Image (spheres, grey):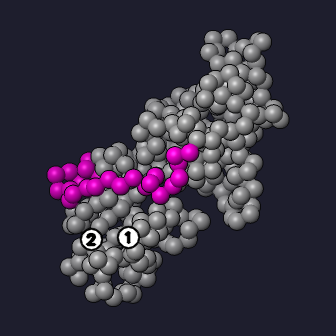
Amino acid sequence: MRILHVVPGLDEVGNGISVVAKLIAEEQGADLMEARLFAKGKGELADYDEVWVHSCWLPMTLKSCQRVLRAGKPLVRMTHANLDPVRLRYHGWKKWLVGPIERWCLRRCDRIVATCEAEKEWIENYLGKCSPPIEVTDIKRFFNLSHVEHVDRVESGELHLLYLGRRHPLKGVEYLEEAVAELNSNPVNPVNPVQNSSLHVSTCSTRLKIVSSAFGEELEKVWNWCDVLVLPTLSENFGLVVAEALERGKRVITTDGAPAWGDGNDYGGRLIYLRGYRDGTKDERVGLLRDALKEVLARVSGRGGK
């Protein structure tokens, strides 16, 4: 079977959707094409037995779907969490306007592929009874996450936190910044612990680095500097950076905004998954992140187990 994957863009560094599409296409021995080219009629559909179209809402994506449907070829969609209720509310009026066209295309798919059970539920809720078959594929299989490698104890008195990605209202960076500021302004000391604190850790500051774009050697330097990767997201299509961090043996803090990582596996104590974050208040989100950072400090100081 010859398969074509149609993606918004093929920029591997800046587009998580294209990275996932490339991984699946490589596994299948499939071809890739940018949606802007495919929507303009590039590529012979007769050469393919099945076409996968990635993402939602974009005019070029919808035109690509319509081209496949007009040709009578099996259409497979990956929505990449674009039907998450949190995302649907973001710029909701635009999605309300294009919603009828998107539903029309989705309901005529041969099948839809979700990255986790939560995303499957989002798709079912959005499409209702007219939903085509939905299958779940685990993207984590493409990464070597089985090894256990603990972060060394912090000897410098400074825990290095990394947020790797663009600033966006759904990424929750502002909650992380506030949690770090609160923690640094009131560090916990085992001799004189903060009142009512259950975690007694040695006094240690946390330093947060926010990197929106880094490539090649520069990116590797950032990873080498990092002790903990933090993804404080409210909505994520998969959380590719989580897999990249775990593959490097880094500790990770992420949230139920990236539900693909909520399967109960803590990867040898390297992953902290914050439940109740995505639907919480601002203060609750900041508190969850602050407590998670305290837990990591306890672990790397040798006082908190794993």
The label number, if any, that marks residue 290 in the structure image: none
Magenta region includes residue 292: no
Q: Which residues are magenta?
A: 123-147
Q: Mark 2, residues whose alpha carbon is within 10 Å: few (<14), some, or many (≥20)? A: many
Q: CA distance from mark 1 to mark 2?
A: 16 Å
Residue 184 position (above or below residue 126): above
Pick the residue in front: 139 or 12.
139
Residue at x 53% of width, y 53% of height = 144
Q: Is residue 222 visible?
A: yes
In the rendered structure, the answer to whether residue 272 lies left or right of residue 203 reads left
Magenta region includes residue 146: yes
- In the rendered image, which quarter contains the C terminus? top right
The label number, if any, that marks residue 75 in the structure image: 2
Residue 143: x %, y % from top left: 51, 55
Tag 2: amino acid: Leu
Q: Residue furthest front?
A: 147
Where is residue 230, by image quadrant?
top right
Residue 284: x %, y % from top left: 53, 28
Residue 282 position (above or below residue 194): below
Tag 1: amino acid: Gln
Label 1 belongs to which residue?
28
Secondary structure beneath dot 2 equals strand
In the rendered structure, the answer to whether residue 91 lies left or right of residue 51 reads right
Residue 237: x %, y % from top left: 45, 53
